[in-house]
Amino acid sequence: MKKLFTMVMMLMGLVLLVGCQGESEAVTIEFWHNYSASDGQVEVLNSLIDEFEQAHENVTVDAVYMEWSSLKDNVVLGASSGVLPDVLRGDIAFVPQFQSLNVLEKISDYDNYDSIADTVLDSANSTNYMNGGYYGIAANTNTKILFYNEDILDDNNVNVPTTLDEVWQAAMDVSSDTVTGYVEPWTGVWNVGPYIWSEGGDILSPDNTTADGYLNGSVSVSVIQKLADMYAANQLTGSSMDPSALGDTDGWAAGKYAFELDGPWRQSSCESANINYGAKALPAGSAGSISVLGGEDFMMFKSSTDEEKEAAWEFTQFMVSKEAQVEMAKVGQMPVNLEALDDAEAIAAMPLLPIFKEALLTAKSRPVIPEWSEIENVIATKVAEAITGATPVQQAMDEAVTQIDEILGN
């Protein structure tokens, strides 16, 4: 009888244990994002979440939309308050900033991180690498390719350029009283970086500790001097150089601009204005064709429980899968998943995707450091001064280096 009683109690304990374990498996994760509702991205996201939850019955994903600045501000606030999401999809520039707050999970420590990372573009995922590890994984990407007005080139008997030098020459050749050959709406590294990199120069040292000898080096100065010469000859314009200049979108619509290095959004604006345009990867300079990386990353947070981290990582893996990436491509999000980049449905939705993929394979991210936003603002200001002739190019770059090295603590 005593043995029977003992067995009954053991069975009851086992049932209770299993029941408790079953209850503990149910978990809700909070996902902060800034997918656009107007482009149909939130609708697709909700559909993907439904699919994920059906395959993971004990996981609920609570998606919370925030604007770009709110995402950043709420994480900065959460670093001290402890109110943070389990997963966040945000700008690639957020990773070093959030990592410096010591709130991000180092997900490259997860056993299968490497195998998942192998399915996405190396260039896009490089934006998550800091201090010997990865603090996120690429969510979607973009880069810039060369758009050109076919009619302007034809009217001037100018061929589509095949080298970076030919780009500058073509812009000069088509410029007139009614046409400006090249437009650059801003003067940060997002804009001038590709030209400097493609000619073999750089912005900071390889260890990101100084700008001296790089931003003010001979290659960078030569590239910016070329832009300054073109600006002086009315062959280059942009609103950050000349506030009275016609905006790039309006200028394209009016048939005023011939060339621009830009992202996928330029395609839609050209098509809506019935512009006969062409596009290709940035023609190579002396060091190759090196465009600039943009996009977003998925990040996870230390403050989550182990159960929340497990569920968050499952959700993140699902969102970088081919299926999810193709669905997001249909609403304008450029995939990072290698299979999705070649998928027929994704290409049908984004016809220029093969050209962007070509550019992405050699594209470069801006320095992944917490101080980058402040540094790029310095560069944008000083490059604008140099291009417009307000300050001689070498002097402007030397002054920029002094300010940047102060920001870096030198």
Image: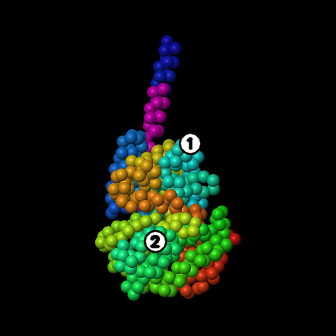
User: From what the image shows, is residue 35 above or below residue 185?
Assistant: above
Magenta highlight range:
14-34
* Residue 407, position as x, y percentages in the image: 63, 71
Categorize mark 2 by other alpha carbons within 10 Å: few (<14), some (14-19), many (20+): some
Q: Amino acid at mark 2?
A: Pro
Q: Secondary structure at mark 1?
A: loop
Asked if residue 13 can be seen in this view, the reply is yes
> Of the numbered discs in the image, which one, if any, rests on residue 111?
1
- Would residue 197 appear left or right of 69 to someone viewing this image? right
The residue indicated by pointer 2 is 161
The quadrant the C terminus occupies is bottom right
Residue contact between numbered discs 1 and 2, judged by CB atoms under 8 Å: no
Q: Vertically, is 170 above or below 8?
A: below
Q: Residues within 10 Å of mark 1 (few under 14, many from 20)?
A: few
Query: Residue at image x 47%, y 19%?
Result: 8
Based on the displayed image, in which of its 4 quarters is residue 57 positioned? top left
Q: Looking at the picture, tell me which residue is in the foreground, 335 or 71.
A: 335
Which residue appears at 39% of the width and 48% of the height?
Answer: 323
Q: Quick check: can you spot residue 71? A: no
> Is 389 contained in the magenta span?
no
Q: Position of residue 223 (x, y in %)?
A: 56, 76
Colouring method of the image: rainbow
Q: Nearer the viewer, residue 407 or 220?
A: 220
Badge 1 amino acid: Asp
As measured in the structure, the alpha-carbon distance from the residue carrying label 1 to the one carrying label 2 is: 47 Å
Q: State the residue at coordinates (64%, 79%).
A: 398
